[in-house]
Image: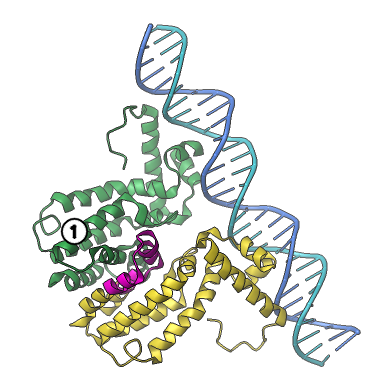
Chain colours: A green, B yellow, C cyan, D blue
Amino acid sequence: MNLLGDDPPRERADAARNREKILAAAERLYAERGADRVTMDDIARAAGVGRGTLYRRYPDRAAIAVALLDTHERAVQELLLGGPPPLGPGAAPGDRLCAFYGAMVDLLDRHVHLALGVEVGRSRFQTGAYGFWRAHVRALVVAADGPDPDAAVDLLLAPLAPDVFHHQRVVLGLGADRIKAALAVLANAVLGGA
Amino acid sequence: MNLLGDDPPRERADAARNREKILAAAERLYAERGADRVTMDDIARAAGVGRGTLYRRYPDRAAIAVALLDTHERAVQELLLGGPPPLGPGAAPGDRLCAFYGAMVDLLDRHVHLALGVEVGRSRFQTGAYGFWRAHVRALVVAADGPDPDAAVDLLLAPLAPDVFHHQRVVLGLGADRIKAALAVLANAVLGGA
DNA sequence: CGGCTAACTGGACACCTTGTCCACTTCATC
DNA sequence: GATGAAGTGGACAAGGTGTCCAGTTAGCCG
């Protein structure tokens, strides 16, 4: 969403420097306290910039969290498109969904703070990343000849909602492995033998 | 949560009258605008009471939405416990989960505004209602000999998250029937032949 | 190198919402 | 109808958001 390369006016040096400072400060604050314990003012002060500078680039806290997650999500997205099976192309749909679930649990496990931060303003469905996951899983459902992919895909993505993961992992204290295993059962049940 | 019957000091007449006015006004406002377009002040003014009166009974907006949903949810809960199969006891786990999904979609379809309103303060996992759905679905998983019910149950409940439903129903424009059908496929895949 | 323009910066500002507090009122009981 | 407790309502302070604009700085061009 920010590396499209079609921006003739190059980013100014001071602006780039500040963007780095902002993202670094935000990542630190999000990790230290919870997602909703961080205000725009906190980030601005920690980054050593004014509030106006913050709002120029990021309309709200969610945008900052999205930008931070972007990097990590992109890595997974590339593996989905061109990595080795079963995450990448070449395996059965059920196995690929299973691998996708596993990768997403790993991602969530490392960045729950950020993922929860995305959900402050309005839900995750509007982010570009969700669109990507949606297209991927939809293709898997189609490949497995599952019924009504358009309705099924959001249901299959629902268990990966950050708040669900947070509840299982932190509140209930389940291990990442147990969550992965349970998701694997789900994946195989829906796309495995269908 | 409010009908426990162990309150020796009976509710005073004026308090009861105001509770009615508050709930009526809140339900109307939640329906008119979205869940997050309603402030405590709006409710107080619409109900013709002061802010202090509101906060005496309900610590935040979420509490009001919970109280409103409570009535409707209780009806479903009673059907789950003692109604005719497949919603009530006596049918196969897969069929019961399927019926449960259907009933929940109907509930959400009528009261999305309230369901979304519950999610403002902090997530739905802490409400008593979620505990009930959780216990119910967990029992179904156990009855079907599914693996690791404690991990599976929240995954099976995730597709019923109000924001997921809202996205499917309102944003994507899917019919309730399609959502029910997709959930039925899910239910049968996981608990059907297991 | 010096000036020009547009982008960038930062903090003051006004607005809105929340939640608390307390003097006053109303109810239920005796 | 007097009394005490529960209930009421609005003023208040605190905190966060997003906007705005005067001043600054980077990149470019003559």
Residue at which label 1 appears = A139
Which picture quadrant has residue B173?
bottom left
Does residue A28 sit above or below A151 in this rendering?
A: above
Question: Furthest residue to the left?
Answer: A90
Which picture quadrant has residue A140?
bottom left
Q: What's the residue type where badge 1 is placed? A: Ala
Residue B113 horizontal/vertical position (percent): 48, 67
Chain ID of residue with mark 1: A
Residue A100 horizontal/vertical position (percent): 20, 60
Please give left or right for residue B133 compared with residue A99 in the image: right
Magenta run includes residue A151:
no
Residue B60 horizontal/vertical position (percent): 56, 66
Q: Which residue is drawn at 39% across and 91% down?
A: B83
Dominant secondary structure of the residues highlighted in magenta in the image: helix
Instruction: Work out whether residue A141 can be spotted.
Output: yes
Does residue A143 sit above or below B178 in this rendering?
A: above
Q: Give the range drawn in magenta.
A: B156-183
Q: Which residue is drawn at 15% across and 66% down?
A: A145
Give the number of callouts. 1
Residue B140 horizontal/vertical position (percent): 29, 84
Quadrant location of the N terminus of chain A in the rendered image: top left
Q: Which of A16 and C3 is in front in this view?
A: C3
Q: Which residue is drawn at 46% across and 78% down?
A: B128
Instruction: Work out whether residue A173 can be spotted.
Output: no
Q: Which of B88 and B125 is in front in this view?
A: B88
Quadrant location of the C terminus of chain A in the rendered image: bottom left
Which picture quadrant has residue B190?
bottom left
Q: Report crowding for label 1: few under 14, some 14 to 19, many 20 or more residues within 10 A (C-alpha).
A: some
Q: Which residue is drawn at 45% across and 53% down?
A: A121
Q: Is mark 1 on a helix, strand or loop?
A: helix
Please give left or right for residue C26 compared with residue A34 in the image: right
